[in-house]
Image (cartoon, helix red, strand yellow):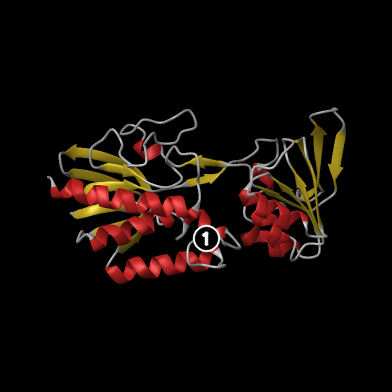
Amino acid sequence: MYDVIIVGAGPAGMTAATYALRSGKTVLVIEGETIGGQMSNSPRIENFPTVKASSGSDLADKMFEQMSEFGAELELDKVLSVEKRGEKDFLVKCEYNTYNSKAVIWATGAKHRHIGVEGEEELIGKGVSYCALCDGAFFTGEDVVMIGDANTALSYTMFLSNCCKHVYICTLFDRWFGEKAMVDAVLARENVSYEHNLSLQKFLTDDQGTLKGLVFRNTKDGSERRYDVKGCFIAVGQIPCNDAIKDLVDLDKGGYVLAGEDTLTKTPGLFVAGDCRSKRIRQVTTAAADGSVAAIAAANYIDTL
């Protein structure tokens, strides 16, 4: 049995692992997808303390190296359920194995939200993408559309503008929701333009079933706007990954775990950290802060058993 099982190897989970290990606890980190989580897909991070600029993948590598040097164990597996079987016994069931621990830190983050327009799912990998860092190079020299109005969309636009001929940003509302510094930097690019108040209506495809254009409706005047592009990148928010613990926690209407800055849930011994927690600000720094708080709280919980 481990002292602490941490589910998720993003900035929250890896920070939690480092702090729990420094508290003298045995730690298993379980990750079902990518080390670093969504941070690993960020082309450039400039707001993490002591790091002037770094790709998300490089920062994730450093966090992983740090927790590994302290002795964290890592399993690549998908968690299916978490059960509490006694005062100090959590059972974590995965696709391939089952693990036990005295405490659990849930740090699964969130996944990309889809728009829900007909044909979207079929076009993933055929012109539609949710990760500019992963797929941007496939559209070198092409015009692309970026749908979104917050920091992720702006960061992706900066990256795409380095390789694409032109990036058209389409936002649903009439304002930006990202940091002013990022907005200013993006709009200073000569090959970037934007249009507000656009609602996506239709994906256009060619005979091979790949993307060839998008049709939007202007929400102010009802006019139609068409973009003839082969690439569309979507960054319109996230959906938390909390299904496996939904019976052990309280969730808000968006599916995020209701927990305060202390990271405590209604189940003693179960702590939640990072983007899967109900909170106003979701940044790498706030995820790391949650991880440190959750780890210290978990260590204190174990010490009182």
Give the percent coordinates (x, y) of residue 85. 18, 38
Image height check: is 180 above or below 72?
above
In this picture, residue 151 sits left or right of residue 76: right
Image height check: is 275 above or below 158?
above
Looking at the image, which is closer to me, 236 or 94? 236
Q: Label 1 amino acid?
A: Ser
Q: Residue at x 72, y 63 (%)?
A: 138
Give the percent coordinates (x, y) of residue 126. 70, 52
Q: How many numbered tags mark residues here?
A: 1
Q: Quadrant of residue 139?
A: bottom right
Image height check: is 145 above or below 222?
below
The crowd level at tag 1 (other Cα within 10 Å; few <14, some 14-19, many 20+) is: many
Please give the residue where the numbered disc 1 appears in the rendered image. 40
Give the percent coordinates (x, y) of residue 151. 62, 50
Q: Quadrant of residue 304?
A: top left
Mark 1: which secondary structure?
helix
In this picture, residue 2 sits left or right of residue 216: left
Instruction: Specify whether residue 179 is in view.
Output: yes
Instruction: Specify whether residue 78 is in view.
Output: no
Q: Residue at x 43, y 51 (%)?
A: 287
Quarter of the rendering occupied by the N terminus: bottom left
Give the percent coordinates (x, y) of residue 292. 33, 54
